[in-house]
Amino acid sequence: MNRALYVAKTGLEAQQFRLAAISNNLANANTYAYKAGRAEFDDLMYQNIRQPGAQANQDETSTLPSGLQLGTGVKAIGVQKIHTQGNLMVTDNQLDVAIEGKGFFQVLDQGGNLTYTRDGSFQVNQNGDVVTSSGYLLEPNINIPQDATEVSITRDGGVFVTQPGNVEQNQVGQIQLASFINPAGLEALGHNFYAETTASGVANVNDPQTAEAGALTQGALEASNVNTVEELIGMIEAQRTYEMNSKAIAAADGMMQYLNNNV
Amino acid sequence: MDRMLYIAMSGAKEVMLSQANNANNLANANTDGFKQDFNIFRAQHMQGPGWESRAYSMDERPATDYTAGAIKVTGRDLDVVTKSDGYMAIQTPAGDEGLVRTASMQVLENGNLVDVSGNPVLNEGGIPINIPPTKSITIGDDGTISIVPADSPSNQLVVLDRLRLVKPDIKDLQKGLDGFSRLKADAAPLVQEQVSVVSGALETSNVNTAEALVRMIELSRKYELQVKMMSTTKSHAQKSDQLLSLR
């Protein structure tokens, strides 16, 4: 069978995969703390059809000066999360916290497992505990007293509240941040959560502004780091490359059709 | 039967192989760092007394086109591309040194600096680079890797290592069956050289898509030509059968 057909097929698949990654980025262009994913490709193995230097025939003086190695196409090797900082958007909400740096907030999911997120749009649940918008508890737990009139969160993670009849602010907790040596290796769980994997390395937990954790900004959220212009360009590129590969399929098909009709 | 049929058949077969190569270039039009392969046809004479009246055509991949692709800015610190005629070295899965112009690097959990497929990036001594916990990594113009260590109180940059940067002669480069470019066995070993490195950018594939599309059409038509020759041979044979048939 015609190899060109299969090679061009891998090209179509790769572009379709790329378009899916781009669509996901565009769909999340307004998701707080979303990190853009970039589709990565690799060329497939090459096949040795004729070895360079092989004998062309029985006459020993004749060898092939260069052989024929045919590539077998392209494959998508994955979507790499690009963990660059997103813009900070000021919301003036007391419990919105943005991270400037490499860290992640630690939260406990329903099963009590530690997951990680950079989405700092926190709220208070019925017990006064600080939770994410999906209701996951911040770890270590921070409880805001019922009568607190104001909450302030410092750059280095201290959580202070103002209570009636009390001139000084009371510290009610300390936010800690986890960082990973290879954040690209984290498993994206959806809902802005990430889980630790062997590729990401173990979480390195520190107070903000120490080690590689980064600092906190109260009253702000981190916007998605999707560059929409870049994604649109990528979309055009993917579409055109797809078209070219489908042309290659049409050409290979045309060749076989001609052969079938004329011999 | 006239040997013309076999000549035309081999012509068609070789054109089909060439079409596959061209399709591979097109399929990798979006693969960062991919270098397109050349494809040429060569006349291969039959050897021996009385045989040289016929020449078969043979498709070959004589070399790879090592011209630079376009540089696209990604803004990611660990995306690097070498400028001009420079290359950087990675360790291929086969364990030897592969030469690349661009790499989207990552730091693994054990601190190893690897490319996007997990192949270790080599330092100027030719050994894989290891990065300790850091606040940030910067790759300088000459391939110097500087880091701010995680435990540094003052955000002071520390020089850690340097990429292995070389300037091979293009004639000495060869693409292997695994797709990695490496130095030919008989070439002189490469030494560290002054090569500019840009970080925050990747090199796109150097496939010339317009050229590849034109070539695709050209190959399709050439194929039809060969098939036409085959059908001509068929009608020749039919005619001679008719003329010589016994009534």
Image (tube, coloured by chain):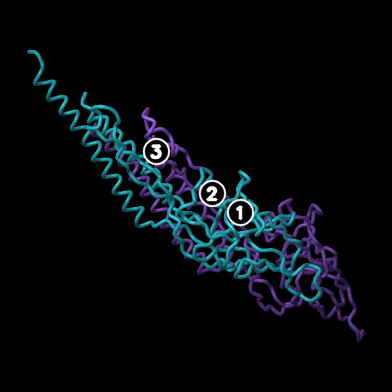
Chain colours: A purple, B cyan
For the N terminus of chain A, the image quarter is: top left
Residue at point 33% right, 39% down? Answer: B58
Residue A12 percent across, percent down from the top left: 45, 49
Q: In this view, does A41 lie to the left or right of B77?
A: left
| Labelled pair 1, 2 in contact (Cβ < 8 Å) | yes
**Three-letter amino acid code at the position of disc 2:** Phe
Q: What is the crowding at mark 2: few (fewer than 14 residues within 10 Å), some, or many (at least 20)?
A: many
**Three-letter amino acid code at the position of disc 1:** Ile
Check the residue under mark 3 and report the chain it is in.
A
**Which residue in the rendered view is the most extreme toward the left?**
B247
Determine which residue is flagged by label 1. Answer: B90
Q: Is residue A106 left or right of residue A80?
A: right
User: B20 and B140: which one is in front?
Assistant: B140
Check the residue under mark 2 and report the chain it is in.
B
Residue A212 in view here: yes
Q: Do labels 1 and 2 share a chain?
A: yes
| Labelled pair 3, 2 in contact (Cβ < 8 Å) | no
Determine which residue is flagged by label 2. Answer: B180
Looking at the rendering, which quadrant does residue B95 occupy?
top right
| Tag 3 secondary structure | loop
Q: How many labels does the image show?
A: 3
Residue A40 percent across, percent down from the top left: 55, 55
**Which residue in the rendered view is the most extreme toward the bottom?**
A167
Q: In this view, does B228 lie to the left or right of A14?
A: left
- Residue B182 vs A121, above or below: the answer is above
Determine which residue is flagged by label 3. Answer: A64
User: A192 and A203: which one is in front?
Assistant: A203
Task: Give the mark, 1 or 2, whose residue is nearer the N terminus.
Answer: 1
Q: In this view, does B145 lie to the left or right of B71?
A: right
Residue A121 percent across, percent down from the top left: 72, 70
User: Disc 1 versus disc 3: distance between alpha carbons?
Assistant: 31 Å
